[in-house]
Image: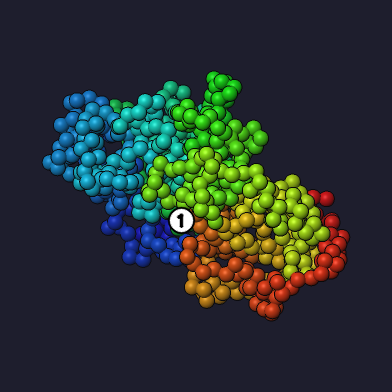
């Protein structure tokens, strides 16, 4: 038995502890050995066994049959932590209403904590209305409104943590009409799209109905009837590790598929209804390790049968059809969401003025570029990055009032935008003129520029720590390198690789670090060469400096420039600042900086100055050179770097 557990542990580790039960290792609690394996996350912190979850399809009010099956499985192969139900939960006929009410009213007991979406069917309005009025269920209860003992309703849409797992959900069926129960609306979709922008990986995504997932799916699944293009778009944006949905009377487990702009794969599981006549599987067990507790290597693992995402084409096709139907002057586009996409809101916009693009304002980039129907305002982007509410920037007011977590006044200013619109024009122009790093600014030190690409340029650092201290800087005004569009990462990777090869030819390694400050002005990624003899001591030096400041770095192994930064992007929270450093062996150390945390602005430089025994050069202001000396250094660097420069 111990050998079997060791084999299971290896299988779990190889697959990111995600789908180990497919090997058939289903052991009861009584058969577990005392020496359970202990796993570690990227920060080397131990955690307990992965949670054990039962997934169930449409219940249709058959709670007796569900409870009997759950109890049986829990006794034979448990214990399990929770049951997640997708599809229609309530009866589709009145003859099973009494069975449902036995549990709701306490005459029968549900054996395990059970969470459900699909809030429609016979008896749903009456039961859910009572639950909604319960004082214990008031407020934002994203982790479920309690219906009765061990039964929780996941209302609308949201995301919560269940035994360490990040769970997102969309309850009900799509409807253009406003209904209290049984349907989801555009606001519910907007919430999920906003959550998709947050850092971290969603472990489980619960939806209904099913959408077309592959042309190879069994009959009844691959057809287009009963599908929902909105869900395909959400899945493509959220990129969950598991997508669980009700099917049209069938069980279907699709092969894993890769995601655009994400390093992890997604597994789709479609479940049949409880008590279906065709004996299709309606309950399925998984034991996934939370992504937050996995190493970067585990997250990046791709099984041999991994395929391309089925939603890329589905989403593009749906969008193309939508475009064909849409009038040429329409601005509705489901991919560009929240306040800048709602036709209803725009119909009630009495001013008819141009709105801001939320995508650009929140992230600093918009893939539609000049074709976007909304304004790309850099000044508004800067205010948003300083914590100002988007509604306030866009409309001059916020309907959420005190419930809003953002500021309702301009950062560093105490006045509202005139006529509900942000100031641009002169305010933006003046700010860009004052920026040291904007190529369009008259204040830029052009004599320090080493090379210029499409989206980035390289320059010698002013007051360099060492002779060839280089900065990689976005050409446009962005507060950090993660605010640029993901596709620009290719160019950044080429510049970094070129610098690595250049310094390697000189017998040196290079350290990259960036201080991602949420109130930052213009991004700059520092590249500092160090002797090969010092490379092995860099990580210990940074970790020792962190200990003195009272924090520990999270460490991840970078399998390449793009993979490491993709993982950093998933952890990027625009509400927080963070520092990261890329070491010569591929390790990335990162630390989120809390609002009131005292974190040295020159932390990276100070650590490397100490490593190189140059503590007197820790402050760049002590290292200023004359323009003549700077020019000589730049000319010397450019001559030697020319053969490596990807912009040449």
Please name the residue shown 75% across and 57% down the image: 443
Above-or-below relation of 512 to 353:
below
Q: In the orientation shown, which residue stands out farthest toward the left?
A: 107
Please name the residue shown 42% across and 51% down the image: 405
In percent of width and height, residue 132 lies at: 25, 40
In percent of width and height, residue 184 lies at: 37, 32
In percent of width and height, residue 621 lies at: 70, 72
Residue 259 seen from this side: no
The way the protein has been coloured in the rendering is rainbow
Residue count near mark 1 (Cα–Cα under 10 Å), binned few <14, some 14–19, many ≥20: some
Query: Toward the viewer: 337 or 262?
Result: 337
Query: Toward the viewer: 455 or 299?
Result: 455
- Quarter of the picture containing the N terminus is bottom left
In percent of width and height, residue 332 lies at: 52, 29
Please name the residue shown 21% across and 30% down the image: 123
Q: Is residue 518 left or right of residue 399?
A: right
Query: Toward the viewer: 456 or 571?
Result: 456
Please name the residue shown 46% across and 49% down the image: 408
Q: Is residue 42 left or right of residue 537?
A: left
Query: Toward the viewer: 575 or 556?
Result: 575
Q: Which residue is mark 1?
A: 292
Q: How many marks?
A: 1
Q: Quadrant of residue 147?
A: top left
Residue 546 seen from this side: yes
Q: Secondary structure at mark 1?
A: helix
């Amino acid at each position: 038995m111990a050998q079997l557990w060791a084999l299971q542990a290896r299988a779990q580790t190889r697959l990111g502890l995600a789908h180990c039960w497919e090997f058939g290792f289903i052991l009861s609690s009584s058969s577990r050995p005392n020496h359970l394996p202990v796993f570690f996350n990227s920060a080397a912190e131990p955690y307990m066994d992965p949670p054990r979850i039962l997934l169930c399809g449409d219940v249709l009010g058959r709670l007796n049959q569900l409870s009997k099956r759950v109890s049986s499985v829990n006794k034979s192969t448990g214990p399990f932590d929770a049951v997640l139900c997708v599809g229609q939960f309530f009866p589709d006929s009145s003859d099973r209403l009494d069975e449902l009410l036995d549990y709701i009213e306490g005459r029968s007991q549900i054996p395990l904590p059970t969470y459900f979406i699909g809030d429609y069917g016979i008896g749903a309005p009456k039961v859910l209305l009572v639950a909604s009025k319960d004082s214990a269920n008031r407020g934002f209860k994203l982790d479920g409104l309690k219906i009765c003992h061990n039964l929780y309703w996941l209302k609308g849409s949201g995301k919560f943590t269940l035994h360490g797992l990040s769970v997102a959900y969309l309850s009900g069926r799509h409807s253009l009409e406003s209904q209290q129960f049984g349907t989801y609306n555009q606001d519910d979709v907007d919430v999920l799209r906003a959550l998709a922008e947050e850092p971290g990986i969603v472990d489980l995504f619960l939806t209904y109905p099913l959408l077309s997932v592959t042309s190879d799916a069994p009959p009844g699944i691959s057809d287009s009837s009963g599908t929902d293009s909105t869900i395909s778009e959400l899945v493509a944006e959220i990129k969950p590790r598991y997508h669980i949905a009700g099917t049209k009377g069938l069980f279907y487990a699709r092969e894993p598929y890769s995601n655009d702009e994400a390093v992890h794969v997604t597994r789709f599981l479609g479940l049949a209804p409880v008590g279906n006549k065709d004996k299709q599987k309606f309950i399925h067990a998984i034991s996934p390790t939370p992504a937050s507790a996995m190493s970067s290597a585990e997250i990046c693992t791709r099984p041999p049968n991994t395929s391309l995402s089925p939603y890329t084409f589905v989403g593009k096709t749906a969008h193309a059809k939508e475009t064909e139907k849409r009038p040429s002057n329409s601005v509705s586009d489901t991919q560009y969401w929240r306040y800048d996409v709602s036709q209803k809101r725009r119909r009630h916009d009495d001013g008819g003025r141009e709105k801001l693009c939320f995508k650009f304002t929140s992230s600093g980039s918009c893939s539609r570029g000049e074709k976007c129907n909304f304004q790309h305002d850099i000044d508004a982007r800067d205010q948003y990055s300083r914590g100002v509410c988007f509604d306030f920037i866009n409309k001059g007011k916020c309907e959420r009032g005190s419930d809003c977590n953002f500021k309702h006044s301009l950062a560093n200013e105490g006045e509202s935008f005139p006529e509900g619109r942000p100031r641009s024009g002169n305010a933006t122009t003046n700010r860009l003129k004052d920026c040291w790093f904007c190529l369009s600014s008259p204040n830029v030190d052009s004599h320090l520029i080493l090379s210029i690409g499409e989206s980035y340029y390289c320059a010698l650092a002013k007051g360099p720590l060492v002779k060839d201290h280089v900065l990689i800087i976005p050409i446009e005004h962005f507060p950090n390198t993660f605010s640029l569009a993901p596709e620009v990462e290719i160019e950044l990777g080429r510049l970094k690789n070129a610098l690595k090869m250049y310094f390697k030819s000189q017998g040196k390694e290079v350290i990259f670090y960036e201080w991602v400050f949420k109130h930052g002005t213009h991004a700059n990624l520092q590249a500092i060469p160090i002797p090969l003899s010092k490379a092995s001591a860099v990580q210990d030096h940074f970790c020792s400096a962190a200990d003195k400041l009272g924090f520990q770095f999270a460490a991840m192994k970078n399998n390449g420039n793009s993979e490491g930064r993709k993982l950093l992007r998933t952890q990027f929270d625009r509400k927080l600042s963070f520092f990261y450093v890329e070491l010569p062996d591929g390790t990335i150390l990162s630390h989120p900086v809390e609002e009131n945390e005292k974190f040295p602005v020159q932390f990276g430089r100070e650590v490397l100055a100490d490593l190189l025994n140059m503590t007197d050069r820790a402050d760049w202001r002590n290292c200023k050179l004359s323009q003549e000396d700077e020019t000589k250094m730049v000319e010397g660097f450019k001559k030697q770097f020319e053969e490596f420069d990807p912009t040449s």
